[in-house]
Image (cartoon, rainbow, N blue to C red):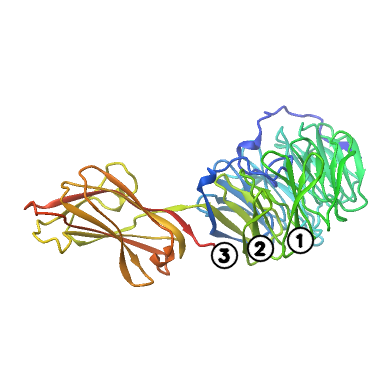
């Protein structure tokens, strides 16, 4: 059942890949399906689509590295890609031999592993990719052929950096991370279409194959136990308490002892449960999707059903959980859902294409949704610097838009004449920017100014594109020291942006008392649009 094909093992650092926010399918080698880092919960906003990353049929979520890179595979164009998490820009591409129907996995030295499946007679491979050159260091033929549009084995990186991959031909390979040759090979299994996971002590691996689930020693590949399920197993995950939890095609859900495979608990769902579970931040709750349209919340210790949430369509893919316990998944009919830890729905949004793999979660709570394209969905507000400064009255003495980004005493200096009337502004300047997105649900305008006199009135206006007018949003006397203000726009925020995404503010300075008889000077230390939350539109 096991053949040893490489006798020399090189001792490697036991450093964990956990510093990467989402280094492999379902986040870690145990299949936890939960983010390990996230932002202050108070900063999480309503979601919005930052970018639809152009790739030809992305079915599984990307691997996300700590250095800001992401790696994703795609189907029709047989490609593995590198992209920038912050901008969503494509950084590199390599054309593989066949379809990329799985998630990549990041290794201990920043390399990554990408697997392919053969759509017909071709057989799949696994590649060790150099992320700098986007060329393979080595590849190994796994003999994997496509089963269907959903199930495919992703690589798993072990604690010593070696990589595991299953095959439709009934093999599991432990491949040497640098040599690319098998350290051992497990054979004569049923088809292995589910990602291999580790027990929590890393001594054993859990393999779902045929109609069974088995455990093997990681060091040697020797068989430890097998549990027959009498139905195709779902993908397994190992809970923080050590239980091996998996569903099956007949709806039976098992909590198994990792040492001997004996059932600790048993639950029956209303439909098949082919996907892997995910776990709450404290590990006490197991979340599992089912073809009966339900998300089940089970108590991890004994399998008790705590609550269920019913969708309109079948749920085929694994859920993903963020650091505050919110659960994310997409239905087969392409609606993405966010569910609160108590089982109440938080938000849902219909997308265009069917989702076939689980969602990856970035360190800022960005969702990377494999939905034909790779949808990058932010849950943090964004900011925009001023791009244009136009003087309508007064004089620009010094500086420009580059001085407006930060509160750093690097300022734009303006001057106005010594008017005797307070009817007309002596200084009038328009500050505008162009955003990537139309119709925000809310935004703020941040401003920090001072003047050489307290005898001016500073009026702030925003241009209302819907009504084609300037709306006054703030008015106050000038101060001699920097005076920071933040103007929050919530209701009707979309009225202040045009179809092209422009936002426009205007500052007016009028006399606020007797004229001093000399020119007045104003300094703008900072001006920018912050806390911009675009509307959730695909």
Q: Are marks 3 and 2 in contact (CB under 8 Å)?
A: no
Q: Nearer the viewer, residue 383 or 202?
A: 383
Question: Can residue 62 be seen in the rendering of this structure?
Answer: no
Gap in angstroms between the C-alphas marked 1 and 2: 12 Å
Which residue is tagged 2? 335
Q: Quadrant of residue 509?
A: bottom left
Question: Can residue 111 be seen in the rendering of this structure?
Answer: yes
Which residue is tagged 3? 538
- Residue 83's place in the image compared with 502, above or below, is above
Measured as percent of width and height from the top left, residue 505 is found at 31, 60
Which residue is tagged 1? 293
Secondary structure of the residue carrying tag 2 is strand
Locate residue 376 relative to residue 359 in the image: left or right: left
Mark 3 neighbour class, 10 Å CA radius: few under 14, some 14 to 19, many 20 or more: some
Secondary structure of the residue carrying tag 3 is loop
Q: Nearer the viewer, residue 90 or 19?
A: 19
Gap in angstroms between the C-alphas marked 3 and 1: 23 Å
Measured as percent of width and height from the top left, residue 268 is found at 86, 52
**Chain-order first, disc 1 or disc 2:** 1
**Chain-order first, disc 3 or disc 2:** 2
């Amino acid at each position: 059942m096991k053949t040893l094909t490489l006798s020399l093992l090189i001792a490697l650092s036991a450093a964990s890949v956990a510093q990467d926010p989402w280094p492999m399918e379902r986040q870690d080698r145990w299949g936890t399906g939960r983010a390990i880092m996230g932002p202050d919960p108070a900063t999480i906003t309503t979601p919005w689509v930052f970018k639809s990353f152009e790739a030809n049929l992305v079915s599984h979520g990307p691997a996300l590295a700590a250095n800001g890179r992401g790696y994703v595979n795609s189907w029709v164009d047989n490609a593995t890609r590198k992209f920038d998490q912050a901008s969503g820009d494509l950084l590199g591409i390599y054309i593989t031999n066949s379809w990329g129907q799985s998630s990549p996995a990041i290794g201990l030295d920043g390399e990554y592993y990408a697997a392919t499946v053969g759509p017909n007679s071709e057989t799949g491979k696994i590649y060790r990719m150099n992320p700098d050159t986007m060329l393979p260091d080595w590849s190994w033929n796994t003999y994997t052929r496509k089963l269907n549009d959903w199930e495919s084995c992703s690589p798993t990186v072990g604690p010593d950096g070696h990589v595991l991959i299953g095959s439709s031909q009934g093999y599991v390979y432990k491949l040497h991370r640098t040599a690319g040759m098998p350290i051992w090979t497990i054979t004569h299994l049923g088809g292995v279409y589910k990602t291999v996971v580790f027990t929590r002590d890393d001594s054993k691996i859990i393999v779902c194959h045929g109609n069974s689930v088995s455990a093997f020693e990681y060091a040697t590949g020797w068989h430890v136990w097998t549990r027959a399920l009498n139905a195709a197993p779902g993908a397994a995950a190992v809970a923080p308490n050590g239980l091996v939890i998996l569903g099956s095609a007949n709806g039976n859900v098992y909590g198994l002892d990792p040492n001997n495979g004996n059932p600790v608990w048993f639950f029956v769902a209303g439909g098949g449960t082919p996907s892997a579970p995910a776990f709450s931040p404290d590990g006490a709750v197991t979340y599992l999707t089912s073809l009966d349209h339900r998300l089940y919340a089970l108590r991890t210790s004994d399998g008790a059903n705590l609550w269920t949430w019913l969708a309109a369509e079948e749920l085929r893919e694994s859920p993903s959980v963020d650091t505050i316990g919110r659960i994310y998944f997409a239905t087969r009919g392409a609606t993405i859902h966010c569910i609160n830890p108590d089982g109440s729905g938080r938000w849902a949004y219909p997308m265009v294409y069917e989702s076939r793999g689980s969602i990856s979660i970035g360190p800022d709570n960005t969702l990377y949704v494999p939905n034909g394209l790779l949808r990058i969905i932010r849950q943090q507000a964004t900011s925009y610097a001023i791009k244009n400064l136009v003087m309508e009255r007064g004089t620009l003495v010094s500086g420009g838009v580059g001085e407006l980004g930060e509160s750093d005493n690097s300022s734009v200096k303006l001057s106005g004449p010594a008017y005797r009337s307070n009817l007309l502004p002596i200084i009038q300047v328009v500050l505008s920017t162009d955003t990537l997105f139309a119709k925000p649900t809310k935004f703020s305008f941040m401003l920090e100014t001072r003047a050489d006199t307290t005898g001016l009135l500073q009026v702030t206006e925003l241009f209302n594109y819907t009504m084609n007018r300037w709306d006054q949003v703030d008015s106050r006397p000038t101060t001699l020291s920097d005076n920071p203000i933040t103007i929050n726009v919530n209701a009707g925020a979309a009225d202040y942006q045009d179809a092209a995404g422009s936002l426009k503010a205007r500052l007016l300075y009028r006399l606020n008392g007797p004229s001093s008889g000399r020119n007045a000077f104003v300094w703008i230390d900072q001006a920018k649009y912050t806390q911009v939350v675009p509307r959730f539109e695909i």
